[in-house]
């Protein structure tokens, strides 16, 4: 798939411009999924850029793609929205869509093409693992790595889905090389990083919009941080959770995932409805294990990260990257 994407991207860029692009001869035998180098020839100039290939690019990846700008790198992908491409340009990240649309800055060379129509790759595979129900299962695997050792029935109870759904999700995660099957009903996550980023992207796109939500503000003059001192019957996520985890950001907003009544919690916290309020209550989409410590009101990292990048302000992206590196990256 990666080699096909690379070939299509090079061909379409050449058709849309006077630019000639070649894969560096030293890289002809490499694994395309790990990237390589491209040589660009334009008029009397030439330059060389390292590249990496991703099927899709989303806000979930922006905190880490920013590093490409510092190392004169290039990301090649099938498709990204106008908003994502604008964010990449703001971060000074070079990119090349397989359609030939491109943003490349190297010293005094500037290439910008954004007129070509999207090119779709043929992909007839099912995607139960990242459907509304599949995302609930994958969330459990990401939030608690020990949950992969649970029975289908136990995992189904936590995620609120059927045993059949668990089976289909596992088969697809193995097929797409997120997991490997060790023996009968025993699995291991082998690409946590990719699974995490793909879950964040598709949670924000597919599951999150389906959840009930309502915004509030304090009736009196209090600070968001005061929520951390209350016994909230829910999970605090987003900026406020990130503030507690990292002490790197001063939260302007807070999300509370709640299994119970929004109104009851609002009354207990002296909140009033406000569509632009900084406190958003969101329907909880999982079931808490009975043995989990009830005093722990901070959501699990995948959810905090997803909430941060759903509002991709520079500070949120920096914080998302920081808490991921401190809490996940080095333990993968």
Image (spheres, rainbow, N blue to C red):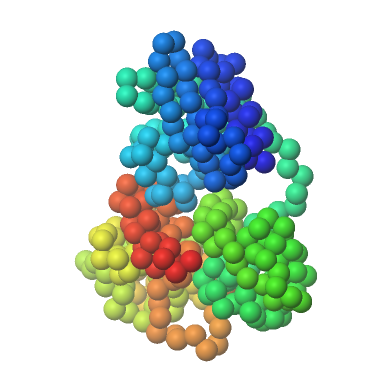
Where residue 112 sits, quadrant-wise, is top left
Which residue shows up at 39% across the image and 49% down it?
63
Where residue 154 sits, quadrant-wise, is bottom right
Residue 172 horizontal/vertical position (percent): 72, 59
Which residue shows up at 40% across the image and 73% down it?
298
Which residue shows up at 53% across the image and 22% down it?
21
Q: Is residue 295 above or below residue 269?
A: below
In the picture as drawn, the residue positioned furthest to the front comes out as: 26
Q: Is residue 86 visible?
A: no
In the picture as drawn, the residue positioned furthest to the left comes out as: 221
Q: Is residue 247 above or below residue 310?
A: below
Residue 163 horizontal/vertical position (percent): 75, 74
Q: In this view of the protein, which residue sits in the foreground, 244 or 147?
A: 147
Q: Is residue 20 above or below residue 178?
A: above
In the picture as drawn, the residue positioned furthest to the bottom comes out as: 291
Q: Is residue 186 left or right of residue 239?
A: right
Q: Is residue 269 above or below residue 90?
A: below
How many badges with numbers are in the image?
Answer: 0
Q: Is residue 327 left or right of residue 119?
A: left
In the picture as drawn, the residue positioned furthest to the top comes out as: 43
Which residue shows up at 44% across the image and 79% down it?
233
Residue 86 horizontal/vertical position (percent): 42, 33
Q: In this view of the protein, which residue sits in the foreground, 109 or 144?
A: 109
Q: Is residue 312 visible?
A: yes
Quadrant where the N terminus sits is top right
Q: Is residue 315 left or right of residue 12?
A: left
Q: In this view of the protein, which residue sits in the foreground, 36 or 266?
A: 36
């Amino acid at each position: 798939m990666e080699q096909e994407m690379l070939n299509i991207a090079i061909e379409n860029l050449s058709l849309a411009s006077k630019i000639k692009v070649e894969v560096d001869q030293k890289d002809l035998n490499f694994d395309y999924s790990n990237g390589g180098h491209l040589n660009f020839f334009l008029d009397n100039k030439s330059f060389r850029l390292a590249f990496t290939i991703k099927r899709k690019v989303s806000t979930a990846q922006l905190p880490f793609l920013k590093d490409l700008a510092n190392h004169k790198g290039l990301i090649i992908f099938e498709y990204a929205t106008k908003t994502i491409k604008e964010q990449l340009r703001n971060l000074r990240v070079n990119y090349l869509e397989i359609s030939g649309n491109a943003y490349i800055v190297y010293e005094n060379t500037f290439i910008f093409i954004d007129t070509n129509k999207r090119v779709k790759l043929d992909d007839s595979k099912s995607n139960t693992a990242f459907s509304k129900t599949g995302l609930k299962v994958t969330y459990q695997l990401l939030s608690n790595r020990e949950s992969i050792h649970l029975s289908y029935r136990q995992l189904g109870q936590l995620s609120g889905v059927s045993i059949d759904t668990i089976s289909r999700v596992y088969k697809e995660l193995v097929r797409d090389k997120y997991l490997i099957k060790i023996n009968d009903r025993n699995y291991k996550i082998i690409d946590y990083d990719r699974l995490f980023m793909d879950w964040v992207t598709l949670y924000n796109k597919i599951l999150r919009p389906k959840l009930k939500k309502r915004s509030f503000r304090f009736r009196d003059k209090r600070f968001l941080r005061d929520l951390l001192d209350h016994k909230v019957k829910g999970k605090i996520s987003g900026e406020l959770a990130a503030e507690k985890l990292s002490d790197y950001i001063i939260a302007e907003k807070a999300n509370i995932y709640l299994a119970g009544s929004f109104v009851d919690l609002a009354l207990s916290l002296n909140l009033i409805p406000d569509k632009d309020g900084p406190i958003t209550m969101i329907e909880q989409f999982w079931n808490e294990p009975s043995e989990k410590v009830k005093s722990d009101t901070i959501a699990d990292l995948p959810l905090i990260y997803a909430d941060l990048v759903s509002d991709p302000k520079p500070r949120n992206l920096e914080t998302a990257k920081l808490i991921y590196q401190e809490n996940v990256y080095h333990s993968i």
